[in-house]
Amino acid sequence: MIAKTKITKTQTTDLKVKLFRGFSDHSRMSILNALRSGPLTVNEIVEATGLSQSNVSNHLGCLRCCDLVIRQQQGRFVYYQLSDERIAKLLDLADELLADVALGVNRCNTYD
């Protein structure tokens, strides 16, 4: 039997920071938002986000590396989708929270 590695509170915090860093880029957030509606090809993501194809491809690589997005080959097309439905739920919660705190977030100069 293989023992599970125990993760410290500091390691957990570091992983959370790294997770949210994945969400903190405008292009990646645009892609994740587009994928909330379901699987899309790169061209469909480009059309939905207005980003260039190379930008979308680069960020999809990052999102796949972090296991936030998966891809599936269907015939000659590759479809990308969120790897876990909880990602969409997290984005929904962010929308709900922003409905209440958007003015404060907008005024915050710390994160610019």
Image (cartoon, rainbow, N blue to C red):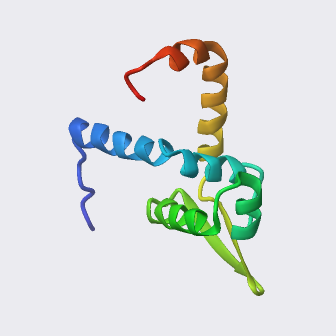
Residue, x 37% and y 40% (percent of image)? 16
In this rendering, position of residue 78 left or right of residue 14: right
Q: Quadrant of the N terminus?
A: bottom left
Residue, x 49% and y 46% (percent of image)? 25
Looking at the image, residue 18 lies above or below residue 54? above
State which quadrant residue 26 falls in.
Answer: top right
Residue, x 67% and y 75% (percent of image)? 72
Indicate the position of residue 51 as horizontal and vertical percent values.
65, 57
State which quadrant residue 95 falls in.
Answer: top right
Indicate the position of residue 36 as horizontal and vertical percent values.
71, 49
Indicate the position of residue 65 as horizontal and vertical percent values.
45, 65
Q: How many marks?
A: 0
Indicate the position of residue 97 as horizontal and vertical percent values.
61, 21
Residue, x 66% and y 23% (percent of image)? 96
Answer yes or no: is residue 39 visible.
no
Looking at the image, residue 38 lies above or below residue 71? above
Answer yes or no: is residue 43 visible.
yes
In this rendering, position of residue 57 left or right of residue 5: right
Looking at the image, residue 100 lies above or below residue 76? above
Q: Quadrant of the C terminus?
A: top left
User: Furthest residue to the bottom?
Assistant: 76
> Which sits in the foreground, 67 or 50?
50
